[in-house]
Amino acid sequence: MIDLASLSPEEILAFLLENYDKKEAIRPFFGDEIFRWIHSRWEYDTSRYSNIPKRLRDFLSNETFLPKISAKYRLISRDRSEKLGVELKDGEIVETVYIPFRNRATVCVSSQVGCRFGCSFCQTAKMGFRRSLSPSEIVSQVYLFLKEGNRVTHVVFMGMGEPLDNYENVIKAVKILNNPLGLGISIRRITLSTVGLLPGIKRLINEGMQINLALSLHDPIPEERQRLVPAEGRHPIKKLLPLLMEYYRRTSRQVTFEYVVIEGINDTPRHSRQLTRIVEGLDYKLNLIPLNIPGMDRKTWHRNKAVVLQFKEMCLNAGLKNVTIRLSRGVDISGACGLLAGRNRRDSNQRR
Ligand code: SAH
């Protein structure tokens, strides 16, 4: 059985031509039409595809499937961001966050159940790795919010998992989201955040897409970075930087460095000085993120924010230019950076 919602219009058509016995009944526009039903009308019941012949519809329901994903629980933050626990067809759960902000509305999608990369401060890492998501499981997370009448202007791959560790499916999902027959979101409004897997970045360079790249740097000093981001061992910043430079040269897209500021660990003048060497020659943004800790009290939250403000000053004094602070949204619903981890049934339908 083939997952119809993971295919491009061309692939749908090719699949029909190859597998449907009455080839003469296949019109060239069926690929586009079926794609539109799925990705523009979010209709996952093929028997309702009214402009497709009945016999072909029967074939679709027997020979293909559409991933049934549903919201298992929903948490709404005081800041209006919203987190869904999404159940996949094998019962696994990933989390997806909707973040409205001024005239933007961003969906933060997950690309894997769990993660292999074990960053020391990240909750997803604690789950271990379970599996990668299919393209349709990724795009369907966005559709869950659209179906409820929300607008979506941006998509960020900053949920659970390491997107470059699921390279093909992530790129397929990006192309589906970008397709004008579906959501038609501009590639420039899609961001991929990564610990910096070298092979993945090399492939991205050749992809020729202007996707935004965010690197989870967190520390400019290799031996120290490795303690926070163990991927540094096999994917060292030393090798990463020339690739980022090349990516920037090819796409003209500003590169974002993400930096979770952890008091006493990566917030000293030594770090800010070293950061200036890292960004040399790049059009960059340094995005400082307060450390999120599950269940932290207000005092800790304010303390972590203060630590970020202080480090920002240090960075500006060192001569860094584009330093921004990502004030994480949805901290009260564990929807913020690094707090996503599947929950169990007990939490179903919990609201705050
Ligand atoms: N695996 C990818 C995608 C996850 S993106 C990556 O690492 O980039 C989520 C972002 O939130 C990453 O920059 C991650 O390092 C950051 N993050 C993880 N744990 C965090 C925490 N406890 N507090 C703040 N940010 C965190």
Image: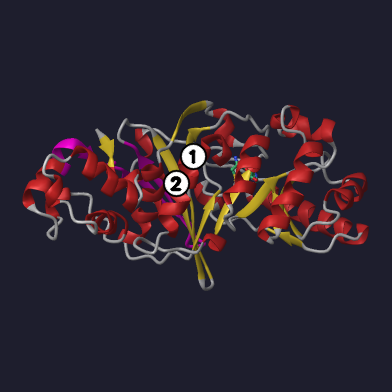
Picture quadrant where residue 178 is located: bottom left
Q: Quadrant of the N terminus?
A: top left
Residue 335 at x, y = what percent?
52, 49
Asked whether 104 falls inside the magenta stretch, the response is no
Front residue of this view, candidates 49 and 113: 49
Name which residue type carries label 2: Lys
* Disc 1: which residue: 168
The residue shown at (37%, 57%) is: 145
Asked whether 77 falls inside the magenta stretch, the response is yes
* Side of 293 relative to 113 (left or right): right
Residue 22 visible from this viewpoint: yes
Depicted 218 relative to depicted 178: above or below:
above
Residue 262 visible from this viewpoint: no
The residue shown at (44%, 46%) is: 172
Q: Indicate the secondary structure of the residue bearing disc 1.
A: helix
* Side of 225 relative to 251 (left or right): right
Residue 242 at x, y = what percent?
78, 45
Residue 322 at x, y = what percent?
78, 63
Does the beta carbon at disc 2 come under 8 Å from ligand 1?
A: no
Depicted 325 relative to depicted 268: above or below:
below
The residue shown at (87%, 61%) is: 316
Magenta stretch bounds: 60-88
**Where ligand 1 lies, by image quadrant?**
top right
Q: Residues within 10 Å of mark 1 (few under 14, many from 20)?
A: some
CB atoms at circles 1 and 2 under 8 Å apart?
Answer: yes
Furthest-bottom residue in this view:
103
Front residue of this view, candidates 31 and 124: 31
Name which residue type carries label 1: Glu
Residue 185 at x, y = what percent?
46, 63
* Disc 2: which residue: 172
Front residue of this view, candidates 320 and 278: 278
The residue shown at (61%, 42%) is: 203
